[in-house]
Image: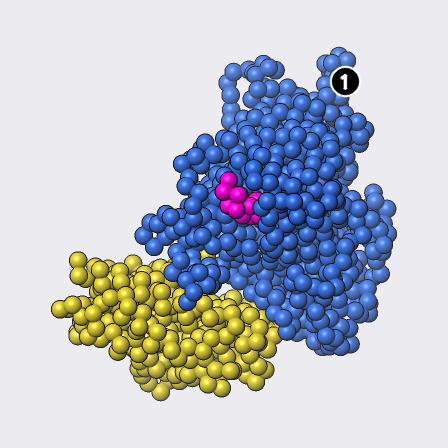
Amino acid sequence: MREFSYQRATDVDGAVALLDADPDARYLGGGTNLVDLMRTGVERPGRLVDVRELPLDSIESTDDGGLRIGATVTNSELAAHPQVRRRYPALAQAVLAGASGQLRNMATVGGNLLQRTRCAYFTDTSLPCNKRAPGTGCSAATGEHRNHAILGASAHCVAVHPSDMGVALAAFDAVVSYETAEGSGQVALADFYLPVGDTPHRETALPPGALITAVTLPPAPVAAHSRYRKVRERASYAFAIGSAAAALEVADGVVREVRLAFGAVASRPWRAGTAERVLSGRPPVASVFAEAADAELAAAQVLEQNAYKVPLIRNLVVALLTELAEETTR
Amino acid sequence: MTTTAQPTATTARHRSVGVAHTRVEGRDKVTGAARYASEQPFADLAHGWLVLSTAARGRIRAIGEEAVRAMPGVLAVLHSGNAPRVMTDYVSLLGPPDPTNALFQHDRVPHIGWPVALVVAETPEQAREAAEALVVEYEVEPHDVAFHADRPDSYVPDDGNAVLTKGDLEAELAASAVVLDATYTTPEQHHSAMEPHAATARWDGGRLDVLDANQGAMWVADELAKMFSLDPSSVRVRSEHIGGAFGSKGLRPHQVAAVMAATVLQRPVRVALTRRQTFAVTGYRSPTAQRMRLGADPDGRLRAFGHEALNLTSTLRPFVETSAALGRVLYDARAHHTAHRLVDVDMPTPTWMRAPGEAPGSFAVESALDELAERLGMDPIALRARNEPTVGPLSGLPFSSRDLLGCFEEGARRFGWAERDPRPRLRREGRWLLGTGTAAATYPSGAAPSTASVTAEADGTFTVRISAADVGTGARTALTLIAAEALEVEPERVAVRIGDSDFGPAWVAGGSMGTRSWALAVTSAAAELRGRLALGDGEIPPEGITAHTDTAGLLAELAKKERHSFGAQFAEVAVDPATGEIRVRRMLGIFAAGRIINPLTARSQLVGGMVWGLSMALHEEAVRDPASGSHIGADLAGYHVAANADVPVIEADWIEDPVPDDPVGLKGIGEIGIVGVAAAISNAVWHATGVRHRDLPLRPDRVLRAEEARTGA
């Protein structure tokens, strides 16, 4: 483990300036992922800039009826917030489905978005991995890949993004705000994670040195009727092998609005736009839900060990939407 | 804990053994006052960090020692070119040494994770950074780590117990009305003790002094003495508190490395393993592939009992996972054939892990019995009762005590087994399919020679000294109660000192033999002391009066019998066929395990074993990367053990099980809790879904695939 220096930032400009001055520095949020990676040698920063004390820890309603979530809000605070629970329940459920109580008390919203894949080849520095060491190859594609991507992957990398929170954010069209030495900017979550292609080591659209300051959820009445379900290999404290966030509004016997996103299937939280288009205007019945899931999953490229994710996601979609439909029409 | 009334000798006896007693060191442990092996402060302490091979087979070509020596704080780099030579051609209390301990003796790399160097520095951080910077060049050779049932190069190990046969299996199978022929597999599993291994070695007044966490201080001291060619009396190993062991805490590379470095540097050296290193160098349970062949008459009487178990071992030493052993005890049959085979691969050497043999073996045997019961249209408990032996099925020896059927009877009553509809896939609750299952459990209850001393102190208290180990189970407390009973005094007047090789030879905390072996020694020393006190004038000199015993003679006189504990496991599961998730809803284990010393810690140990079995059924699995041979995900995020949320209501209890000819009436309970649990859960999954699973763990993807196959999707 490399020796590093540590500084606590007290304002956003100061934090950004420190990163700008030192390309060897990293922001430290809750440290629940970065510190692990430093211990195993995957990350070797020379300097840590602790941003946890920055005044970015509030959740506020926006003028248009959305919600602005500060980047240093902890996962626990996010999941417990009354506005989140009432207006975006799937988000609260997703956060609570992740990690453990202790980790959620530490982990921040900004850090959650920037956490790295848990692909075991990525975290073992003795093995080839294009994401960690570009050009060395993807060990998972021909090795162990039971929990790897079925959508949007490439021959260069089949790792999945581990976030639960991000899946709900993707369903609700979240927008990420950031600050750099050159000024502030915004990027939609849909564009936040870069396509894998042949550059799996380039993960986000954030400019170098950018500090995430907030995540904004636009108003979405449909989100008030939403749900998150996570399937994992033990009942708690494990990453998803498949998950889904869904929101549904039914009017006059047909789907009026639907949101659908999947976790643990791709290098990013996967917004299921194709499935949403299939569902729109159709009756809310299991056969239609399955048809929509199949339409989304038609693009799936399965490997030897992860083909089960196709029926898993299909079954999750049908189960979640059926539950939501039964509740709306009750 | 304080009493006002003066207890008489008679009430004191009734107060100790069999009455719940909290751990005597419990307060120290929960307040942090109890120091574990890596927490003892030392002046001038240096820190060693092991460097493990990333090649799965080959030769070390070069070690970039120079660059690392110049790094901050680095004191030494030990490797095959400069390390002290050690002796490895010896036999210890438990057989030949683990090959991984022959540190830095040659430049061969026989498997991944093989220790290739030790970097010693002033701080652990410096040692780690330097160790990770050390460039080791390998001449890599092709490796083979693939394990599967059909390996053509498997062989019968040179071990008298590898194969036991009675009657003609093939003929009896041919004559059977109902036959089952199925193969079951279990994956590579790791001990994953909460406390990672750590040891500190130093030379103190001409003696080697090692602070360690192990299952037998005398065992480790004896091995170190042999390995470093030292007089046994010049080695002292202490192991006061241990945060779990499960078979992995004998002599391991970290102690050897610490002794080497302390010898070279002539200052105290600590070597503590990281979690990942414990996965690499402290042993594991081999994967198994087990073929079961059962043949029965229509009434369920077994004609044929065949169990062939394959496990892997390293190219260095044959290690047999004795999976096929439990059938030799559990069931009678006209023909019995139980056999073990090995295959040598470029993997680390496996070792004992909690319920070695019986844990994976019971998954195969008890799943197969359930499948046979289904084919016979018979209740699984009735099938077991039908094949209950009166003497050892192969040995012909009487049982010291055996009440497997009593366990099933009591378990069935409490679990509500009589109301069970045996047909599968009938019960649904929301998205969950529900089912129940059962399985038998057994584990040998052995004992081995041990020495102990008991001192009557001048202040009226008693001190027991025995080189026992409390690996976290409450052994120190159990021995306190046993000594108090034998001395007919209050437990508060007895101090039990353990975990010090200076107390003399004793059996280890292993094989469910610790408490029984130590209890025999402590009770016989106490009896001798009481005899001497009775002869005396009542005056105790300042140094006290000490009685010392060795149980070798006592044990040699014990009649040869089948000595085992027994149990019946029950489980209820819920399975979501849409997602493959399995949740265990409740478990019940009823055991016949001799006299229970401390109900409080005994229940914990049995429940802990059952949790382990649940974990084995649903979660535990080490995954090897075929290309590199690496264990990938070697940490507690990647190697899943059951989390709290997986653990349902678990009840463990016992029935009376007197062992008339045993001086202490004890059987061990360290392993029996695990045995059969995975089968009970798997049988319950069949009852819930109608699908048989023969490969552990019962992962969601496996359940889903089975559902897809079932519906023909």
Residue stretch rendered in magenta on the structure: B365-378
Q: In front: A190, or B343?
A: B343
Q: Position of residue A62 (x, y in %)?
A: 20, 72
Q: Nearer the viewer, residue B43 or B654?
A: B654
Q: Amino acid at mark 1?
A: Arg
Tell me if mark 1 has few (under 14), some (14-19) or many (20+) residues whose alpha carbon lies within 10 angstroms of its own.
some
Above or below, B76 against B163 in this view is below
Q: Position of residue B387 (x, y in %)?
A: 61, 36
Seen at 55% across and 59% down, the residue is B639
Element marked by disc 1: helix
Output the chain of dot 1.
B
Can residue A316 be seen in this snapshot? yes
Question: Residue at coordinates 66% horizontally, 47% vertically from top-left?
Answer: B173
Nearer the observer, B202 or B10: B10
For the colour blue, the matching chain is: B
Q: Any magenta on residue B367? A: yes
- In the figure, A196 relative to B595: above or below? below
On the question of residue B21 being in view, the answer is no
**Principal secondary structure, stretch drawn in magenta:** helix
Instruction: Name chain A's colour.
Output: yellow
User: Residue at 71% across / 71% down in the picture?
Assistant: B143
Residue identifier under label 1: B532
Q: Position of residue A242 (x, y in %)?
A: 41, 66
Name which residue lies at 75% across and 68% down.
Answer: B109
Coloring scheme of the render?
A: by chain
Count of picture labels:
1
Q: Examine the image and state in which quarter residue A310 appears.
A: bottom left
